[in-house]
Structure formats: C-alpha cells, structure tokens
Amino acid sequence: MHLNDFDFQLPEELIALKPLNQRDSSRLLHVTSSAEFVDRQFQDLLSFFQPGDVLVLNNSKVLPAALNGERKRQEFEARISVNLHKRHSDNQWFAFAKPLKRLKPGDRVRFGAQNQSCLMGALDATVEQILQTGEVLLAFDVSGAVLDEQLNQFGAMPLPPYIASRRAPDESDKISYQSVYAKDNGSVAAPTAGLHFTDQLLDELRQKGVIVECVTLHVGAGTFLPVKTDDVKDHKMHSEWGTVSQANVEAIKTAKQNGHSVTAVGTTSLRLLESAAQETGQLRPWQAETDIFITPGFEFKVADRLITNFHLPKSTLFMLVSAFSGLDVMQKAYAHAIAQRYRFYSYGDACFLQRQDL
C-alpha cells in the first residue's frame, strides 16, 4: 500500500476551528453495512443501539500541555514554547520545544512567569536530555497531582496543528476540548469522537439498557505526526499507554456471547481494545504501551462498530477507518461528506461505521 492511496482533497473551509455550542448537535454520517451513506444528527445515536449492546469510551483526560516559558542562562534569556507529549515519570515529561536550538541539558526553564496574578508563582523545569528525535526530557520541580494542578494553571489546551496554526487556544477550549466523562489525566490530545457526547445522551443510552464501559488510552501528540514513508508498512507508530480492566473484559465478552454489538468511541478506544486482543486473539485485561498500526488487511477481534470524526488525508487514522470499513467505501464516504459540507477534524462532525467483514 502506498501513501497516496489514502489521499483526498479537502476544502480548507471545511476544517472546524471551533466546536458547536451544543456537543450533540453535530452531524453524523452513517456508513451502513451495505456501503450506503445516510445523513443523520448525532442526537439520533440512540436509535443505533439495542439493550445489551456495549459502548466503549476512552476516559483519558487532556492536560493543558502547551506551555510558554523563559530560559535563563547567566545574563542571557530566551523565550521557549513547549508542547508536552508523553509522561515519563511523576515529574518528567517528553516534550517538543521551540526553538530547540536555544536549549541544552541543564538549562532551567520557568513557565508562567508572565502571569503576575498567579498565586502559585511559576512552574520551573530542568532540561535533562535532548533526544535525537528532536524531543527534550523535562524534569519539573513538582510532581504528581501538584504538577497536574500547575499545568492546569499555566498551560493552554494543546490544540491540533491544523487549528493552532490558525487561532490561539482560549479558556473555552479547556471545556470544549475535553469529553464530559474525562477522568484520568494523561492525554495531550483529545479522543475527539467523545467530544460529541453529553451527560444527557449517555444517561439515555444507559436507560435504554446500553452497557457503557470506560477504558483508558493516554493520547500522545504523536497522533498528529505525518506519515513520511511512501510504503505505508515502513511507518513507525508512536506508542501510548493504556489499560483495559477485568470488568471491561467481562462486560464485552458477555455481550458478544449474547449476540450484542460492541461499539468503540474513537480510534483510541478501538486501538486499545485490539491491542488487548492481539497476543491471544481474545480480549484480556491489559496494561501496557501500544504502538499498534492498523491498516487495510488487519483482522479485527473486538470492535463491531466505530464512532469517529473525519480524519486527515494520508494519516494513520484514515488508514485505520479504511481498514475497518474498506478503503473504497471510506474514499466514497469522505467524498460524500465533502459534497454535503460536513465539518472535519477534531471539532468537526462524526461518522458511524460498520465493520466490513460483519
């Protein structure tokens, strides 16, 4: 498979820069099992489920991981911008820093010094390593929950590049770029399919008898890294930490044994479920890093259906949905979505996909 197989042309005006006022008022493209395209509203989701079906959410919480700081070296100062992308320990984070050439191991960087009204003062870190990948390893002076609290104080939401290049993050993004069920701190990019859900919609699903299960996959900034190899199989995926509990496994296995469907909300939930089933072919409790790369030809073990947003051309996420529903089907579905003026990417509309081999 070649990278150009996953290309398409998207008018720039269809990239959603802001969310809708009401989360579940977005549009929903239903790609049926017979490859028909039905234009719906996300609020129609309830009609897709029967009692006993399972809905799997990723409850990872996005940290405000975009930081601006000052590096001081004797009498010399430099402004530094940082995007944290992967937690290494309680007080250490791997990060992308600009301008990288202004940093060296041992440098001290102070974040939030410009915020004179902040009672917490500032957030300080030491540059411990500069990696060949262009990343830095930062060791903060505080750790754990205190560090998370200070990131909330000093950081901005790490909006995707296609939004951040066109507008700055604001305080409203701290609410809108976070699902209503987000719980476990650790992501630096939102599992965006979950942004469409409201508490009311989730309550209605539960009242109908749908089993709602939460797993955790901490999404890294690597999810936005472009594929640079012409031959798709040569691409190396970033790794992300996730966990699937015994309770998750039992609920999903029971549903499948009774003929009910399992719907993953977002590519992150789907990647995690399939990672947990890779070794034995059966879903099992799992806690580890995953760099699973799903492309056409992949044999799915767990998810029957997928709720997801519209993804970038030539991206690993478009490859994943093409593996799930078929490349030809997804190319036609995206052409339909473009013709019908759907809103694309993180703050955009959603689609509901059926697995092609079911």
Image (cartoon, rainbow, N blue to C red):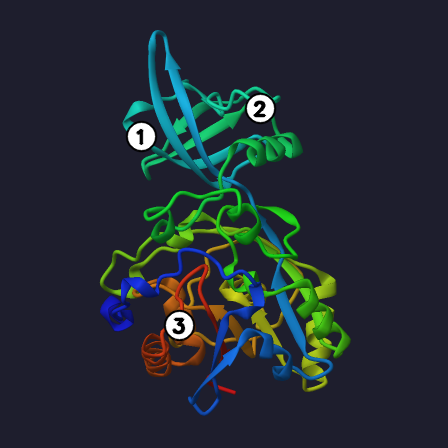
Q: Quadrant of residue 260?
A: bottom right
- Report how far apart the C-alphas of labels 2 and 1 lie in the structure: 27 Å
Kindly identify the amino acid type of the residue bearing the numbered disc 3.
Tyr
Where residue 67 appears, as percent x and y from the top left, is 45, 33
- Disc 2 target residue: 118
Residue 96 visible in the picture: yes
- Report how far apart the C-alphas of labels 3 and 2 lie in the structure: 41 Å
Kindly identify the amino acid type of the residue bearing the numbered disc 1.
Leu
Q: Earlier in the sequence, mark 3 or mark 2?
A: 2
SS state under label 1:
helix
Q: Earlier in the sequence, mark 2 or mark 1?
A: 1
Q: Quadrant of residue 169?
A: top left
Which residue is depicted at the point 32% across and 37% down? 134
Where residue 198 appears, as percent x and y from the top left, is 64, 64
Q: Residues within 10 Å of mark 3 (few under 14, many from 20)?
A: many
Q: Are marks 3 and 2 in contact (CB under 8 Å)?
A: no
- Disc 3 target residue: 342
- Disc 1 target residue: 100
